[in-house]
Amino acid sequence: MYEWLKHVQELVEEIDLCIRNQQDESLTLHHLAAKLGYSEFYVSRKFKEISGMPLRDYMRHRKLAFAQKDLRDTSQSLLQIALRYGFSSHEAFTRAFKEAYGVTPSVYRRNPVPVALRTVIKPFDCYLLECGGKIVPASAGEIKTYFVKIPEHKFLHIRNYESIGYFDFWQKQSTIPGQDCETVCGLLDSIPGKLDDLGGQGMDSSSGQVMAFINEPTGRICSWGIPLAEAYGVRLPVTYIGPVPAGMQLMTVKAGTYLVFEHGPFDFCTENALVEAKMEKAMRDFDYTATGYKLDKMQGRVFYFYHDCARFWKYVRPVRRCRASKREE
């Protein structure tokens, strides 16, 4: 299974590369199977087994996801966009777009409401694996700590008051209509202006999507004694006045000081659990008394969690000055 998780990861990366470079001749089952060295039938069967959908459907939805962003962010004509992503005509593109998103491309361009894009499949995501990877001896690096000031912003999200951890969060959300991982990530992908967006897609902080913990009286009591609701969403400018998808919440997060615990790039498959253990230990052992700050446990404060193994793992925790430090100022 591990080998085929890697192969599917290779496939989804190759598919996105072909779409970006308009290499339609390479975007075929024949080409993709040949690249892996397996028969078309076997590749097609294994892809569906792991992803839950036929490979041809995944490729079609990914093309539409790219087209959606061009509709929203460029002034290209509908025909130009249709031809760019392999549709034979304006009409064929319109039919496929409406079937996928419930609105025509022209209607969407006039009013770019959130739509559930087909987000890129991530075979090694811990939600799919039900684990955090296996621990092996590795030089997972050290944890950096530093303070940052984050301006006032908005946080568009779903939240759960009972979940414990990432996998449990999505398991519980999947029982709520329209709140499953794929739908939520797809809707968030279509929101413009995300503060953390580096062009990634779905379940990845490079796409602007982050986990968070919100200090809420009705949340679960966490290990450091405060009630937290687990959340998943995107940070947006404080000026954001766009739509809020059904089932999501939009809150204003006041400007504040945060303490960041950061680990650099690591290999998800072999180091994820090791890095997580290091992060937890660093946060548990951190000596606040030497800094003049303490963890901010006030209601409404938000703890952000960024997990993007190609760049970093970050916990961003709200802090505030100790009273003694204020007197000294």
Image: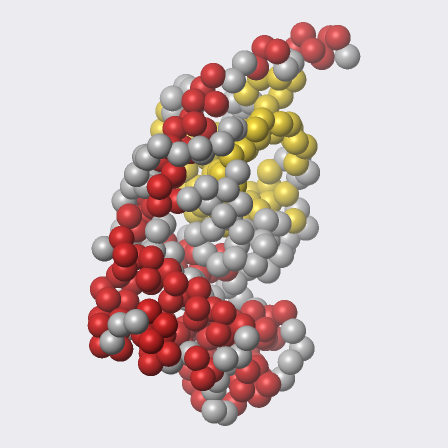
**Foreground of the two, 138 or 218:** 138
Q: Nearer the viewer, residue 307 or 196?
A: 307
- Residue 48 appears in the picture as rendered: no
Quarter of the image with the C terminus is top right
For residue 145, side relative to residue 204 (left or right): right
Q: How many marks?
A: 0
Which x, y percent locates residue 324? 67, 7
Q: Nearer the viewer, residue 94 or 210?
A: 210
The residue drawn where x is 43% and y is 79% is 26
- Image vertical order of residue 46 relative to residue 165, above or below: below
Q: Position of residue 168 (x, y in %)?
A: 30, 41
Question: Which residue appears at 47% of the width and 91% of the height?
Answer: 88
Does any portion of residue 251 appear in the rendered image?
Answer: yes
Q: Residue at x 45, y 34 (%)?
A: 140
Would you place residue 303 above or below residue 42 in this image?
above
**In x, y percent, where is residue 197?**
58, 53
Q: Position of residue 302 (x, y in %)?
A: 53, 34
Above/below status of 323 relative to 250:
above
- Quarter of the N terminus within the rendering: bottom left
Give the colour scheme of this rendering: secondary structure
Residue at the spot 66% in from the left edge and 46% down from the top edge? 238
* The image quarter in which residue 242 lies: bottom right
